[in-house]
Image (cartoon, rainbow, N blue to C red):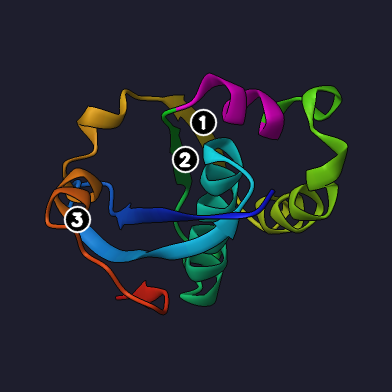
Amino acid sequence: MENKARCGEVLRDVKGLTRSLFSGSIKTMGSKMAEVMAIKIILEMYIGMEWHVKVPLIIEFSSCVTMEWLLERNYRLWILWNLFISTDRCINQLILVHFAFVHWQCNDMIDALVKARVRRLLLFKA
């Protein structure tokens, strides 16, 4: 069953300053899929800005399941296999990537967008 979900991510530099963000609704089959799709979108933005050859990327997860899916192929759902293939292609272009688990309340920018009820028909990228 396909539903709409809200997603968003923030790209920050090493000093913690926001350099880019996106927010919008996507068609998804659950919150974990939405998180993987959000990671894929931010990876594409990161690569598009050509940061992937200059700056290491830290991907923060609010879901242990999503982190396991990206780190361990055996845990992946077959129904999402194409999404993982395209996400893996992006990750393989990075010079260095770190994965970290954080509580969702720690992401102030995304939390503020959700609380402000930012609603867009199209994906917003800045």
Residue 64 is a magenta residue: yes
Mark closer to the observer (3, 2): 3
> Alpha carbon of mark 3 to alpha carbon of mark 2: how far?
19 Å
- In the rendered image, the vertical position of residue 57 relative to residue 123, given as above or below: above
Whether label 1 touches label 3, CB < 8 Å: no
Badge 2 marks a residue whose secondary structure is strand
Percent position (x, y) of residue 52? 54, 61
In the displayed image of the protein, which residue is found farthest to the front?
Answer: 1
Residue, disc 1? 99
Identify the amino acid type marked 2.
Ile
At x 70% / y 30%, what residue is drawn?
A: 69
Identify the amino acid type marked 1.
Phe
Percent position (x, y) of residue 63? 49, 26
Whether label 3 touches label 2, CB < 8 Å: no
Q: Residues within 10 Å of mark 3 (few under 14, many from 20)?
A: some
Instruction: Say the numbered circle drawn on residue 59.
Output: 2
Which image quarter is the C terminus in? bottom left
At x 76% / y 25%, what residue is drawn?
A: 72
Whether label 1 touches label 2, CB < 8 Å: yes
| Numbered marks: total | 3
**Is 69 left, or right, of 60 in this rendering?**
right
At x 73% / y 52%, what residue is drawn?
A: 92
**Is 125 left, or right, of 76 in this rendering?**
left
Percent position (x, y) of residue 30? 58, 41
> Alpha carbon of mark 1 to alpha carbon of mark 2: how far?
5 Å
- In the rendered image, the vertical position of residue 62 relative to residue 87, given as above or below: above
Identify the amino acid type marked 3.
Leu
The span shown in magenta is 63-70
Residue 49 is a magenta residue: no
Instruction: Say the numbered circle drawn on residue 113.
Output: 3
Badge 3 marks a residue whose secondary structure is helix
